[in-house]
Image (cartoon, rainbow, N blue to C red):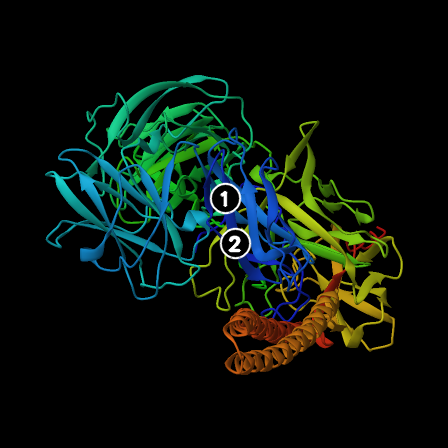
Amino acid sequence: MKKGLHFLIILQLTLLCVSKGYTQLPNAELLTIKPAVAKAGTDEQVTISGTNLDDVNTLRFSDTRIKVSPEMLPTDEYYPTPRPKPNSFKITIPADVAPGTYEVRTLGYFGLSTARPFLILPKDAIEVREEGDHSEQHIAMPLAIETGVLGNLDNRKIDWYKIPGKKGERLLIQMWAERLDSKADGMLAIYDANGHELERNREHFGRDPLVDFTPQSDGDYYIAVSDILYRGDANHFYRLIASRAPHIDFVFPPAGQPGTKTRFTIYGRNLPGASLGNSISIGGKTLDTLEVDIQIPQKSDAPRTFNSDFPRRALLPGFEHRIGKSNATLIGYASAPVVMENPKIEKQKVTIPCEIAGHFDQAGDADTFRFTAKKDSTYWLETISDQMTSMADPFIMVEKITKDDKGKEVLSKVVEIDDPVSFFSVDNRDATNLDTLDAGISFKADQDGDYQITLINQLAGGSLAHRYRLAIRSAQHDFQVITTTERVLADGRNGYPAAPLVRRGGSLAYRVLVPRQDGFDGDISITATGLPKGVTVQPLILSGKSDRGFLVVKADANAVAWAGPIKIIGTATINGKAITHESRNASLVWGSVFSDARRVRSRFDLETVLSVTDKETSPATVAPAENKVWTVELNQKLEIPIKVKDFGTRKGNITVQVEGFPGMNRGNPKITVAEGKTDGKVTIDFKPNGNFKVEPGRYQFIILGVGNAKYKHNPEAAAKAEIESKRLAELVKKLTADAGKQKTLLTQQQKNLDQAKKNAAAASDDAARANLNKKTSEAQVKLDANKKESVAADARVKKAEQLKVSAEKTAKSLSDKAKEKSTEFASPSFPISVEVKPVPKPPEKKK
């Protein structure tokens, strides 16, 4: 499990709902969009799947230039009016949309869904789709170099592809799966024509594999594509390509000072104009090296491009650099002048402030640096390695250097740190991974003199690719903001994504976690902008050492339906200047009942969104009886009267609990308000203990009402389905009647034919017989035509009956779904402010 960095301020916004699987009020979840890849300048037909995707009428892309229209089915005698094909859409991508990964959501009855990535390729890209059975090497599907193929893994099977290879030509073969939100945990292997394995890889781009393959002779070679556990279904899709394009592995130094022009060494494969002079290798593959001078922009936040990696890695500030059509690599912004590690010096002396760029050269490598500190000065140490995807787990130890009576050097440990505090909440009611292995710490020098920092890699392995950044500096107060959206866990084991949806009269709470950079203890105001009319927010103020809370948005009773992007903003005053940062929204990629026991994936979305529904009303709301700043002395109790407002659907008791009080880890105060009752009192004991670490100061928290509602799921859809079922039933009646009339007509025409034949046979002369034979032929033609029409009429009845049965099943399913059920809900209040005062000092005794 990744561990959290000590220095960044993070706003973790988690949708506050009670969760036991999906027994709570529904949110829309998009599971797949297929294909998840298209070319710029083209139209593409896509299909979607998911849960609670009721009445989806369109898709929303993060680039709104991408247009969407539903695929319409043609009219016929069964469906005389146009109707959309379920879950099928046509997307139109303008030619000027830049290649890259975008984000798509559905829009329907429950507003915007969770997001999925959608890859846009250059308009000249060549793409195909897998065809036929190619589950064995001898029936491998041919694939040209520089051609991408979209495929889907079947359970317990392998997909095989045949590519042409030229002696000495370096091919980079990669699989896109995790980067497209596929469930496939991919593996690639390369074989020769005799079935001998030549190369294999499991992880390179996160969980997506890359094989670096150079054929030793001309001929055909075979790619085996599989999941590491050979799993497969509709959710295990992928894209595969074998290419000669350049690829960047990493850059050194990994960061530079903003606004400067800096020389970097780029390490990669198939780099144009590169050399193999440094003989660096990864996994036995020699890397190209290329020296380039790059102008570093003025510092900004991390790039807001799609990144499938852990949120903390995607949050690292920097800018992206490419060589031609290569992948993008991140170059970071150094917080101080960059100093290069000198591996030849055992204890390297550095001047602070500085940021050391170094490598862990071997397993268990320990690098030591010395600097001169001033008494009573506080220094902050920050490592960045895991966040750069280096295979490293840094450990920091700071020692003071003195001399004994004989002048011999003595080292005294000052401070050390392995992993910072995890960003997973103490109550385990979140599964989004905001952690990192990178360590950070501060210390205060107690004397003028030299100090020593030892940086140790606790993971196996070492090379120039095992890079790190070590910053030694005075405090640089700053912050960053993350929002997360997931269903709150009921028992610490479930983890499910959730799209933010607020119902009329209801509210939506976001869990907030705020670590502060370099000891920053100023107030931080968290709010939301871009909210629609009828939806309000009260800012969350995180004061002093407060590092957590809740931001709440509330819809009034007459709020209209709305869906779109919003912005969550954090603002603080630092050194007399207002500093503002917009949030990044993190989410779970797939839900899991056992999120703590599986490789549950978290990543950033490209947008923070909100939906408002006017189809449903919140079952109940809770709020303090008075809107004021409450006061209490340390070690005393505070009673807060609360009010419950019901909207007619609450069923049974409602539990009202304190949530988000800083320092309150377990045992949150709670009360129960019976059905039909509206008043209660929540009592908070402000006596510090192991589960409630409180001290004087101003705090904000919320109260959360949790109960059950009498809920009907989309009754409008059930009513429409019933109307459609009845329409088809009437159509069956009409077509059955028509078919009956046709049979009656057919019977009469058969009689007419039989009579005509008798008349012709009984004719007295040739002329009369000829005339009657003509009439007989005409009667035969009419009969044959009506036989065909009768068969067609029966077929129409049969098809209509099949459509009727299908419509009845749909109507019953939707009717059952719309039946009133007891469903859990959660209702948070706006933030409540409390001032905790210190215990009064006893009066001084008179002398």
What residue does disc 1 label?
Answer: 44
In the image, taking residue 428 as reference, residue 551 lies left or right, namely right
Query: In the drawing, what numbered circle is on residue 87?
Result: none
Labels 1 & 2 near each other (Cβ < 8 A): no
Circle 1 crowding by C-alpha within 10 Å: few under 14, some 14–19, many from 20: some
What residue does disc 2 label?
Answer: 47
Q: Whole-percent x and y of residue 671?
A: 77, 73
Nearer-the-camera pick, 839 or 688: 688
Residue 344, image quadrant: top left
Report if residue 442 is visible in the image: no
* Picture residue at 71% right of the left edge, 70% below the top: 727
Nearer-the-camera pick, 387 or 67: 67
Q: Whole-percent x and y of residue 484?
A: 60, 51
Nearer-the-camera pick, 183 or 222: 222
**Quadrant placement of the N terminus:** bottom left
Kind of residue sitting beneath label 2: Thr
| Residue with the most extreme front position | 765
Give the structural element (helix, strand or loop) at label 1. Answer: strand
In the image, taking residue 693 as reference, residue 845 lies left or right, namely right
